[in-house]
């Protein structure tokens, strides 16, 4: 499993990022190409390339990401307006960085999703 993705480099502070939250297990930073007024990525520090490698003995990793995102939404004041969390897996899901991450999108009415790409 590669621990040399761009997100690992952010975790190791080898490249800069706009970090908004960090604890022992995860880090959150603003997406470099935001798809909404608020677009933050929540990334576990444990190496997990895709959801297909999510450890069966540690499904709580996903819960940790979701809880951190929901708390961030509450702290930032947009929880009541609403938001979306998304995780992409492999090619058809549109995953481009192979360290699992949860997208938090907010700040405007979001469009529908899930249709095949044009
Ligand atoms: P995904 O397509 O689900 O794998 O999402 C990867 C996300 O990482 C995309 O939304 C990219 O814009 C974002 N991204 C790539 N490189 C960086 C970076 N250096 N800092 C912040 N976000 C990044």
Image (cartoon, helix red, strand yellow):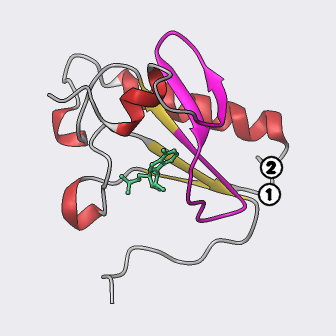
In front of the other: 90 or 77:
90
* Percent coordinates x, y for residue 41 in the rendering: 53, 42
Image quarter (top left, top right, bottom left or bottom right) of the N terminus = top left
Which label was assigned to residue 78?
A: 2
Which label was assigned to residue 2?
A: none
In the figure, 39 relative to 6: above or below?
A: below
The answer to whether the residue labelled 2 contacts the one labelled 1, judged by CB atoms less than 8 Å apart, is: yes
**Range covered by the magenta-colored residues:** 17-41
100 left or right, relative to 26: left
- Does 83 appear in magenta? no
The residue under the point 40% across, 20% down is 45
Q: Which residue is mark 1?
A: 81
Image quarter (top left, top right, bottom left or bottom right) of the C terminus = bottom left
* Percent coordinates x, y for residue 39 in the rendering: 62, 53
The residue under the point 19% across, 23% down is 56
Q: Quadrant of residue 2?
A: top left
The residue under the point 36% across, 81% down is 115
């Amino acid at each position: 499993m590669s621990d040399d993705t761009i997100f690992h480099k952010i975790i190791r502070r080898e490249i800069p990022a706009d970090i908004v939250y960090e604890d022992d297990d995860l880090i959150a930073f603003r997406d470099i190409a935001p798809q909404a007024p608020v677009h933050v990525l929540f990334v576990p520090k444990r190496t997990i390339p895709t959801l297909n490698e999510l450890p069966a003995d540690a499904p709580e990793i996903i819960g940790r990401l979701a809880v951190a995102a929901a708390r961030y939404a509450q702290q930032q004041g947009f929880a009541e307006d609403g938001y979306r969390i998304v995780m992409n897996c492999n090619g058809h899901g549109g995953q481009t960085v192979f360290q699992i991450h949860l997208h938090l999108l907010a700040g405007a009415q979001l469009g529908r999703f899930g249709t095949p790409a044009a």
